[in-house]
Image (cartoon, rainbow, N blue to C red):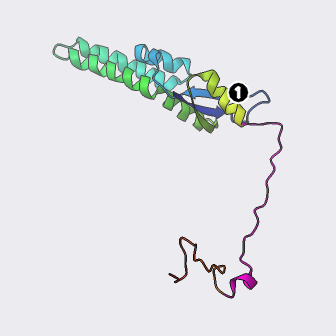
Amino acid sequence: MTSYLVLEAPGGPDRDHRTTRFIADRFVWLALVAPWLWLATNRLWLAAILVFAALIIAGQISALAGFEPVGLLVGLAISVITALEGRHFLVRHLLKKGWQMKSIVTAPDLSSAEDLYFSERSTDVPDMTTTQPVWAPNPEKTGGNSFINDPAGSFLFDLNGRR
């Protein structure tokens, strides 16, 4: 099962919820192979440029004598971190731009996540709030005590000194 983060656009959702985004919280294979490309396709331009520069530097380090494993491990580490945390970085970027996270849905695939999320939301029913009744003890029945007259002592807690 995959967790999907549900984000709505800064101006609120449109009528058909076409701007509502479902972002899966999972590993990204494209980010493992080409992290700068995945960042650029998600419009994370600054991060894409920084990752591209870091990968070039890692490649140059691996060309130095004795530093071949270091350059390879740095490049692999950048790719793995981007593949694991890239979607989290995307969500943070969208939240800074004014998007609002509305829910987290756990589902096996995207269509099931959309069905679960939109089945919980109803656009036809107006928001009806009901008032809660005030449950104050009747002073006539309590006999002046702070608990209702209970000869059997069936209260589990708050016995007010009774045994």
**Residue, x 53% and y 24% (percent of image)?**
44
Provide residue 109's location: percent of width, then percent of height.
58, 22
| Quarter occupied by residue 41 | top right
What secondary structure is the magenta-colored segment mainly?
loop
Say which quarter of the image contains residue 71: top left
The residue under the point 63% across, 80% down is 147
The segment highlighted magenta reads 121-144
Pick whichever, 27 or 150, lies toward us. 150
Rendered location of residue 69, percent (x, y):
22, 17
Q: Residue furthest front?
A: 152
Corner quadrant of residue 155: bottom right
Residue closest to the eye, 62 or 29:
29
Mark 1: few/some/many CA within 10 Å (<14, 14-19, 20+): some
- Going by the numbered disc 1, the residue's amino acid type is Thr
Numbered disc total: 1
Residue at which label 1 appears: 19
Q: Which residue lies furthest to the bottom in this view?
A: 144
Label 1 sits on a secondary structure element that is loop
Residue furthest left as drawn: 66
Locate residue 61 relative to residue 15 in the image: left or right. left
Q: Toward the viewer: 37 or 136?
A: 136
Q: Where is residue 77 in the image (x, y as percent from the top left)?
A: 33, 23
In screen coordinates, is 119 left or right of 46?
Answer: right
Is residue 122 magenta-colored?
yes
The front one of 111 and 137 is 137
Residue placed at 66% from the left, 27% from the top? 114
Q: Position of residue 129 (x, y in %)?
A: 79, 53
Q: In this view, does 43 lie above or below 140?
A: above
Q: Is residue 89 magenta?
A: no
Q: In this view, does 41 lie above or below 81?
A: above
**Is residue 113 left or right of 71 when viewed as pictured?**
right
